[in-house]
Amino acid sequence: MSEPRRERSTEAFFGRRSGKALRPMQRSIRDELLPLLKLDLNTPASADLRSLFTAEVETVRMEIGFGGGEHLLHEASRCPKSGFIGVEPFVNSMAKLVVDLHENPLQNIRLYDDDATQVLDWLPAASLDGIDLFYPDPWPKKKHWKRRFVSQKNLDRFARVLKSGSRFRFASDIDTYVNWTLQHCRAHEEFDWQAETSADWHTPYEAWPGTRYEQKAHREGRIGAYLTFLRR
């Protein structure tokens, strides 16, 4: 049986919500665990986001569109003193991550399975210590560029919720999207690009685990770019 189609009340998410029907075990674990981990945007966000987590954390970061969850799980395991908000509207990707968390529980992850702009608008100002956006849908056709997540409006959202001195990190293997992001961030008064040589954006981030999308890009001969922007 296919997943039920959900009504979309989003601003920035485009594309499919689901792929193959979930296996019964996946669906059961998802239905049991996701409600416990999902952010409740119907209640006001705490001024101190650390209270969202059962673990004692010192910082809070957000990953938008975590895909297979490789990076999110790696970072949450590597940095137990950081809380992580993972956002992924694709049903199958969320189910995969929740099953992984069922098998290897972590207390410093919260999730949201809809449009990331809803979370960004819910969060208090200057509440995040970092935002990651890795290998997002590039929308390669020019007529679809307006669908790209990096935009003036979303950079305004990032600037509002990021603390001064925190980082927005962006990775992609699509040159046009890398250039698009550079142009938008360099034109935004609240972000500074942290790079001096080409090695700075061709070198993966510290302890980078790789992702399945990155592996696909390498198989197809594309090289990733890793951009870091500092919130002023």
Image (cartoon, helix red, strand yellow):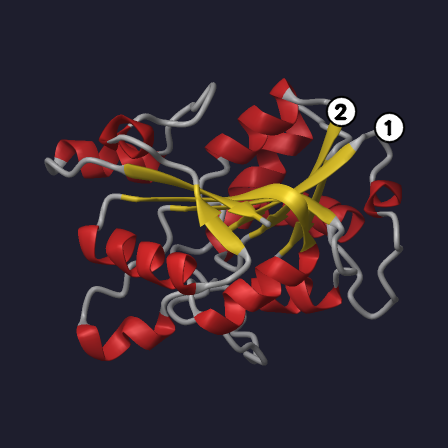
The answer to whether marks 2 and 1 mark residues whose Cβ atoms lie closer than 8 Å is yes
Mark 2 or mark 1, which has the lower sequence index?
1
Q: How many marks?
A: 2
Task: Please rate how many residues cluster around mark 1, counting C-alpha atoms within 10 Å: few if below 14, some from 14 to 19, many from 20.
Answer: some
Q: Position of residue 124 (x, y in %)?
A: 79, 60
Give residue 145's quadrant in the image: bottom left
Task: Determine the image quadrant of residue 177.
Answer: bottom left
* The one of 20 and 51 positioned closer to us in this rendering: 51
Report helix, strand or loop for mark 1: loop
Please, is residue 35 above or below residue 217 in the view? below
The alpha-carbon separation of the residues under discs 2 and 1 comes to 7 Å
Residue 22 in view (yes/no): no
Residue at 54%, 54% in the rendered image: 88
Residue 228: give x, y in percent of width and height. 44, 40
Compared across the picture, whether 231 is left or right of 82 comes to left
The residue type indicated by label 1 comes to: Glu
| Relative to 104, residue 162 above or below | below
Q: Is residue 123 left or right of residue 10?
A: right
Q: Which residue is mark 2?
A: 81
| Amino acid under disc 2 | Lys
- Residue at 36%, 67% in the rendered image: 148
User: Which residue is under mark 1?
Assistant: 56
Q: Is residue 41 left or right of residue 207?
A: right
Residue at the left extreme, as displayed: 221
Q: Residues within 10 Å of mark 2 (few under 14, many from 20)?
A: some
Left or right: 10 in relation to 224: right
Task: Name the element at disc 2.
Answer: loop
Q: Residue sitting at 31 percent across and 40 percent down?
A: 213
Q: Is residue 229 visible?
A: yes
Residue 217 % position (x, y): 20, 39
Residue at 86%, 28% (x, y): give it.
Answer: 56
